[in-house]
Amino acid sequence: MLAGSAAITAFILFTSYFFVFSMEKSISASANRLGADLMIVPKGYGGQAGDMIVSGTATKFYMPGEIINKIKTISEVEQASPQIYMETLPLICCQVEGHFPVVAFDPKTDFTIKSWLAMDKPFEKFDYIAGAEAGGANYLYAMDNPAMEEVTVMFDKEFTMKIPLFPTGMGTDKTIFIHIDAAKEVNAGEKYFPENSVSTILVKTQPGMQEFVKRQIERMNLDVDVVVGSGLKQTVEKQVLPVKALSYIMIGLVIIMSALQVATMFTALISERKKEIGMLRAMGASRGVTFRILLMEAGIASFIGASIGSLLGGAALYDNKTLIFQLLQLPLLFPNWPTGLLIGSVATLFTTIIAVVAAYFPVRSTLKLQPYEAIREGEY
């Protein structure tokens, strides 16, 4: 019963904190993916930029590409990455038919799209990333299978899907992202956009320096509009705050419930074994030795149960990852296996400590009795 109780406790602790951790990771990635500190767009398009540009909606406007080199000269700029918005393509991609905006980005400098990817291999020239509604919805079920490969013809070239983006409910779900070098190659003869041009430049500044960098760029007279990031991270955090609060409340209640349960079980257990404990003490076992034996029993049983509970929790979550994303519709970014194992180990250790601490008080109370008193009480 103690092991079973520990398994349930560890399972709930693991899954609750796993969801909180995944939401935090997702919010952080969202801030990177959609939360550039500044967006540089051609003059007159600042009012249209905002969230639409960051979310991947392709709007055909362009400015000279050399502007990015001038922006990088500002010491307070940490990163600057260009994107080119190309025409919307009518095509069939990954068993999904529709009109998809195509956005070219630079993997070498990008700090937005790549923050959502866990790619073990480099992003090659003719690889592409598909939003969930641009092919990824069906591909999600097989994305972990290395044997799966989806090839799509775009701009008279064959592109291979690298990985789909999980659904977010934002514009990126309908967008296809390609390598900026591939975009330049298929653009021979300026078929799709002016040569040596970009649509927008996403800028990441040093903390608290957004307004200063904005003024610096405006003083350069580059004929551009500078749009300050929309603060998506704060918006998403407000939306998921009730879920996070509920998860932390559940964790607290589980801890209290587990401690009370273990204390109750050990009180009953010690009460039934008072005679054996008294005889053990009468045969020469010291109070300290008996104390350690009983606490070790609680620790071992709880550790075994908690380990099983954490493993079952991890297996259930990772094995049903796609289903969880579709059912909950929350911003979740699951951690990799090593991080998941770390969370499981902490949940197991914490559950074991709770059990040992809860068992301490009934054991301590019983060992205050003299051996003959324990034997006499155990006979009734």
Image (cartoon, helix red, strand yellow):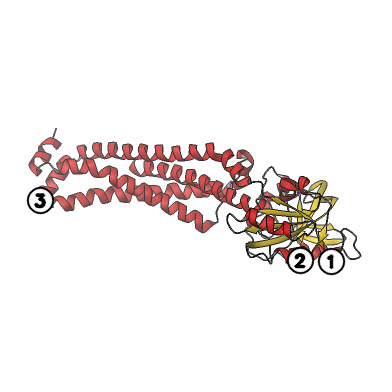
Name the quadrant containing residue 120.
Answer: bottom right
Estimate the x, y position of residue 219 in percent, counting from the top left: 73, 59
Identify the amino acid type marked 3. Answer: Met
Q: Earlier in the sequence, mark 3 or mark 1?
A: 1
- Assign the N terminus to one quadrant of the image: top left
Estimate the x, y position of residue 353 in percent, counting from the top left: 33, 49
Name the quadrant containing residue 375.
Answer: top left
Q: Secondary structure at mark 2?
A: loop
* Residue named by callout 2: 125
* Residue named by callout 3: 283
Q: Nearer the viewer, residue 256 or 274?
A: 256
Residue 173 seen anywhere in this rendered image of the structure? no
* Residue named by callout 1: 185
Identify the amino acid type marked 1. Answer: Glu
Residue at 19% over, 41% down: 273
Q: Secondary structure at mark 3?
A: loop
Residue 165 seen anywhere in this rendered image of the structure? yes
Q: Is residue 250 above or below residue 72?
A: above
Q: Assess whether mark 2 and mark 1 are in contact (beta carbons under 8 angstroms).
A: yes
The 10 Å Cα crowd at callout 2, few under 14, some 14 to 19, many 20 or more, is: some
Estimate the x, y position of residue 150 in percent, counting from the top left: 76, 57
Q: Nearer the viewer, residue 222 or 133?
A: 222
